[in-house]
Image (spheres, helix red, strand yellow):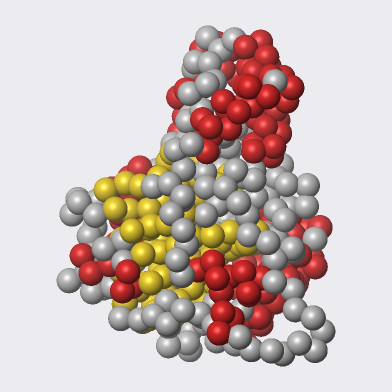
Amino acid sequence: MRADRPFRFVLPFLLAACSPSSPGDDTDTESDDAVPGSFSVVVIPDTQIYADRFHETLQRHGDWILEHVEDLDIRFVSHVGDIVNDGDDPAQWDAAKQAFGGLRDAGIPQGYSPANHDIGTWGTWSTDVDTSCMARPDEKPTLDCGMTAYKEAFGNHLFADQPWFAGGSPSGESSMQTLDAEGLKLAWLHLPMDPPEDEVAWAEQMLDAHPDRLFAITTHRWMYDFRITEMAPAPLDLFLGGRWNAAVGLFAGNPQFTDSVPVEEIYERLVSTRKNVWSVHCGHIDAEFRQESVNAAGLPVHEVLVDYQDYNDGGGGLLRVLTFTPEEDRVEVYTVSTETGEMRENGDGFDHAVDILDAYAGTAFGALEDLGLDTQDVRTLLEQLKTDQTVRDEYFESLYGPGQRDSQFLLDIPFGSYVE
């Protein structure tokens, strides 16, 4: 769905909420209030670089959410994982706890999906790395495979007494949260990256136990997008964006954890065969990408990837905000910078996308030569993207024309059809 329809509800009060106010200006205006009957959910993309090098940006994430709890009526916060860059660095965990501790103190419902960087320091991934951490922790003494640092900072025990906390898996790596808002009975499942069988089975139990709730799933690695479009030469057309799979892992030099359940199997078990799952959010790969699937009941499932970690400043302080208007069967999605207060416009990431392609050309593309990739064709295209306005315009349209990489978009969701 293209995002060229006007944001009828969000934009007026969002602009007011993001506009800097003058010192001492406590003037209250009608546009500062959330639209009656609507509420917001914040999705936090990977914060790993902030935790490593930009602590002030990380802190502004938490501060911004607290500042806009009332005017945006923020009811829930979901983190897609890679909270920190090096899970064995106490200073990074301290920065993350400081940034998001205020959300817990305020009692804001929230959930976190632990990811690979949250369990240790990862160098360059390669296909010969033993990634069996989650299944056999004793074999990875340099990694925090028990997620002890993550659990100390953001573990389920910190939220166990909250009315919205609905339980966690025996390992403590997964969790469930509930939210009743504007007539909707919502729930979130937060799963670790590449969850093993026990975590997926636990999630199945939670879905079975709550058929009256409309579920969203947050995990870390679910989708990918390398900014490759049909304009790229074969065999790059095999990697146009979608759900993560083994071939993508080989292409990216980023294999899946051993003994984890493949994404496609998780999709079948938790999403496509279920009536009451409406969305999946993820991070891990620097990209804005989404696709609409259809479950067995014929209802839309919105799969959304959002991550900005490869920007020079770790991501510009960008957050995703989802504004629900149940009476309209609508969710309006936009992206805002906690650094500048500005909304991110569709297509703003184009130059960054070219930089990403350039970076891939120096690594992953060479591995595809045996499959027939003419790397010179790729390098020629990259040079044209930087110098030839006509080619730039064509590639821009191929990236953003379908609407899958928009920063602002509208979702029509028949809320009442998902639950019993």
Residue 250: give x, y in percent of width and height: 53, 29
Q: How many marks?
A: 0
- Identified at 42% across, 41% down, the residue is 243
- Identified at 80% across, 61% down, the residue is 54
Horizontal relation, residue 278 to residue 343: left or right: left
| Residue sitting nearer the eye, 108 or 16 | 16
| Residue sitting nearer the eye, 166 or 42 | 42
Horizontal relation, residue 43 to residue 189: left or right: right
Horizontal relation, residue 317 to residue 107: left or right: right
Let me know if residue 323 appears in the view. Answer: no
Q: Identify whether 312 is placed above or below 174.
A: above
- Identified at 42% across, 77% down, the residue is 38
Image quadrant in which the C terminus is located: bottom left
Horizontal relation, residue 29 to residue 39: left or right: right
Q: Quadrant of residue 326?
A: bottom left
| Residue sitting nearer the eye, 54 or 5 | 5
Residue 214: give x, y in percent of width and height: 30, 69
Q: Identify whether 4 is placed above or below 420.
A: above
Residue 189: give x, y in percent of width and height: 41, 66
